[in-house]
Image: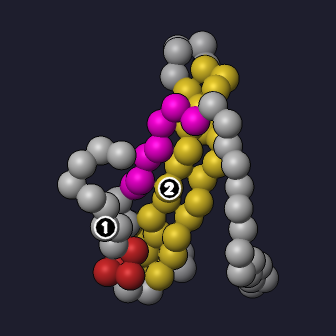
Amino acid sequence: MTTVAIDIQKITIDGTRQIVVTDAVLDTETNQFVRAVRFLGEPYDSNGQPTLRLEVQLRSENRSDLNVTVPSSTF
């Protein structure tokens, strides 16, 4: 399997309307846990929903490595 590693990457996404962080679930093919961070935005689809602009998948053999900590308020 080929692995691509980027040490530092900055991406700007204009028109972001929603950010979704999924639960960490077990990928039975790789035996790793995976959590996705999805960025949705313009254009809107025919149902008025923002479209997926970028998805970042985080993987680890340990589920706890994928824990996300955020402040208790919306920011």
Identify the image quadrant of the N terminus: bottom right
Residue lying at 52% horizontally and 15% vertically, measured from the top left:
48
- Element marked by disc 1: loop
Q: Is residue 10 visible?
A: yes
Numbered disc in front, either 2 or 1: 1
Judge whether residue 49 is colored magenta: no
- Element marked by disc 2: strand
Estimate the x, y position of residue 71 in percent, counting from the top left. 27, 59
Q: Amino acid at mark 2?
A: Val
Residue lying at 60% horizontally and 13% vertically, measured from the top left:
46
Name the side, left or right, on which 26 lies relative to 6. Answer: left
Q: From the viewer's perspective, is residue 17 above or below residue 73?
A: above
Estimate the x, y position of residue 44 in percent, counting from the top left. 61, 20
Q: Which residue is mark 2?
A: 37
Label 1 packing within 10 angstroms: few (<14), some (14-19), many (20+): few
Q: Which mark is residue 25?
A: none
Distance CA(mark 2)–CA(mark 1): 13 Å
Q: From the viewer's perspective, is residue 54 above or below residue 62?
A: above
Q: Which residue is mark 1?
A: 69
Residue lying at 32% horizontally and 81% vertically, measured from the top left:
64
Estimate the x, y position of residue 43 in percent, counting from the top left. 66, 23
Q: Which residues are magenta?
A: 16-22
Which residue is more in the foreground, 43 or 24?
43
Estimate the x, y position of residue 20 in percent, counting from the top left. 43, 46
Residue lying at 53% horizontally and 49% vertically, measured from the top left:
38
Which residue is more in the foreground, 7 or 29?
7
